[in-house]
Image (cartoon, rainbow, N blue to C red):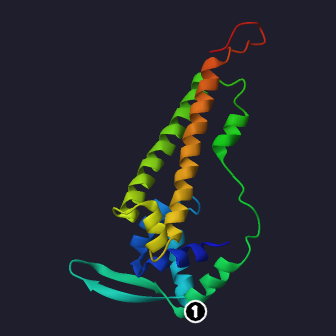
Amino acid sequence: MSLKYAVLAALLEGEASGYELSKVFDVSLANFWPATPQQLYRELERLAGDGLIEARTVPQERRPTKRLFSLTAAGREQLGVFAAEPTRRPTAIRDEFLIKMQAMDGVDPRAVRALVEERRAWALGKLARYERMRERLLDGRTEEEHLRDAGRVGPYLTLAAGIAFERENARWCERVLTVLSERRAPAEPGGQALG
């Protein structure tokens, strides 16, 4: 998959500027499809050139002219075709942190603990942000009411996946911290315990 479809899907919410789209990516899509603002702006230009989105300019007082992007009929059609296609391959995790965990034996346990605590704090921070987004999406309704009555449920369902992912990250980090606390310090080759 390319950034193309992530941008088209983000524009299902309606017309948006490049800046607004970068915020949407940062808050709701970055968990599963990260993009820098530069990548996003390049992709917007490509999509406009391909006729999948259109741009209009809006003059602003004391600020640069703003460009607003929206889906074209061709963009909606191509996104619909993409959404109905089978996924080519299952998700694969590619995470530098997990490589560090794989190599943690023999490393100062305090350094490992600091890495895990940092990852846990990051997961809990994202989880809190996602929970706030969930409350805004629900807007006083129950989850069941929202899923039954909302015009679009895709954003809520992907947010639910992000919430589950970060909850599991935090739970796993807590487990790792417990394991680190309960482990006996390994002996150095000379016989003294590390840490």
Above or below, 140 relative to 111: below
Q: Nearer the viewer, residue 150 or 179?
A: 150
Above or below, 146 relative to 129: below
| Residue at horizontal 44 percent and vertical 83 percent from the top | 69
Q: Position of residue 33 (x, y in %)?
A: 58, 63
Above or below, 54 relative to 166: below
| Residue at horizontal 55 percent and vertical 89 percent from the top | 49
Q: How many marks?
A: 1
Above or below, 4 relative to 179: below
Q: Nearer the viewer, residue 28 or 148?
A: 148
Locate residue 99: give its quadrant.
top right
| Residue at horizontal 56 percent and vertical 51 percent from the top | 164
Q: Nearer the viewer, residue 72 or 49?
A: 72
Locate residue 85: give its quadrant.
bottom right
The residue at the far top in this view is 191
Q: Position of residue 75 (x, y in %)?
A: 56, 87
State which quarter of the image contains the N terminus. bottom right
Crowding around mark 1 (Cα neighbors within 10 Å: few <14, some 14 to 19, many 20+) is few
- Label 1's element? helix
Three-letter amino acid code at the position of disc 1: Ala
Viewer can see residue 145: yes
132 left or right of 44 in image: left
Q: Position of residue 111 (x, y in %)?
A: 58, 27
Q: Nearer the viewer, residue 62 or 93?
A: 93
State which quarter of the image contains the C terminus. top right
Q: Which residue is mark 1?
A: 74
177 left or right of 121 in image: right
The residue at the far left in this view is 61
Viewer can see residue 29: no
